[in-house]
Image: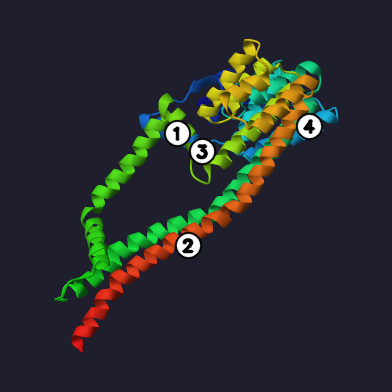
Amino acid sequence: MPEFNYRGRDNRGQLVTGVRKAYDEVELAERLMAENITPVDIELVTMSREQLIKKKFLARFDHVPGDELQMFCRQMYTLSKSGIPIILGVQRLAESSKNKYFTEILAALIKKLNEGQTLASALVLYPKVFSPLFINIVRVGENTGRLEEAFLQLSRYLQLEEETKKRVKAALRYPIIVVVATVIALLVINAFVIPTFTQLFSRFKGELPLMTKILIASSNFFTGYWPILLIVSVGGVIGLRMYIKTEKGRFNWDKWLLKIPLVGWIIHRIMLARFARLFSLILESGISAFEGLDMVASSLGNVYLEDKVNQISKSVARGVSIAKAAAQTEMFSALIIQILTVGEETGQLEGMLLDVAEFYEREVEYDISRLSDVLEPILMVIMAALVLVLALGVFLPMWDMIKMTR
């Protein structure tokens, strides 16, 4: 939000100056008038290059958490159901929100609503917070007079999304901790432990065991070329991030994510559950299947699967049934395709899609609960192998040295 220098006169005619944030000069003038300050001059603050860089950096922290957005939908549902006007409802939420960035957004929404805009058209101004799917469901709710139902549906969907994210994070927490601890241990061993033993083994006249030679070579390489390793590692990460930002890179990255051993299939099913629940939500809101598929595609968060859903949308536009179009993409299992077919034939596609979503969500929940059980023995074997190599490399020459002293 830009800053403005302002000068004005209060009720007693005294000069008042200051700096405030506002979306434009008109909004700031209205706020000053409401405080009985007559604006004399309002000027946009010009920022230096350093200030612009700092502003862009801080803008990265402007984020509305999913649980905050979910709570917004739940509260809007309650307020709308109680018959409270939208403007008053948003104003109450702005007063109670603890997220400063979201409070600013709600204040801007109030301004647009006071100007006569609809809530959906006001939400369009903040695409990073409100997805096209979110906005369209709110728009349909406003047009049909069922805004409270729209917010209830969005609240339930966002709640399920947050619960799934928390389960995935909880399942991956232990493996990540073990991997990080292992990497740190290897760095410490190569940088400090092995060099100490290397000085001791240099006095050994005999032939060193193979394991010891490997450990010494590894340590020498690490200590001698660590700046190069650091530069290569950082450069690799930066290069990968730049590649992912390209259209082809993002497509290949999202496709690869679905093929990661142990985790890829879980991610795939999470995306399929999201597709089914979103599509059901859209159809229940009264949006056509053709429009809904485009909205779902842009809301999946995976470019590879987005392309698959766009293929379904193109097939549906040509008159192909949804079930047949979905089968052509090979996204779903034969059982799910059969369920979709029955849903289309009986006119109960929304309900069947919910069944599909719940089916995949149960599968995801089971897989996540089993993930730690599967990863734990693998990690234990890897750590045991590292300890074995270290032990053999260190103690074998020490035993030989003891034998020679006898």
Q: Mark yes or no: residue 37 visible.
A: no
* CB-based contact (under 8 Å), mark 4 and mark 2: no
Q: Amino acid at mark 1?
A: Trp
Near-viewer residue (124 or 172): 172
The label on residue 380 is 2
The label on residue 253 is 1
Give the residue at mark 3: 61
Near-viewer residue (182 or 256): 256
- Name the residue located 52 percent from the left edge and 46 percent from the top edge: 262
What's the distance in space between the residues labelled 4 and 1, CA to CA? 38 Å
Give the residue at mark 4: 77
Is residue 294 found left or right of 79 in the rendered image?
left
What's the distance in space between the residues labelled 1 and 2, CA to CA? 29 Å
- Name the residue located 52 percent from the left edge and 58 percent from the top edge: 376
Q: Residue 173, relative to residue 162: is it above or below?
A: below
Near-viewer residue (44 or 369): 369
Near-viewer residue (22 or 274): 274
Q: Helix, strand, or loop for circle 1?
A: helix
Give how far across and how far down residue 396 sits, in percent. Answer: 28, 75
Q: Amino acid at mark 2?
A: Met
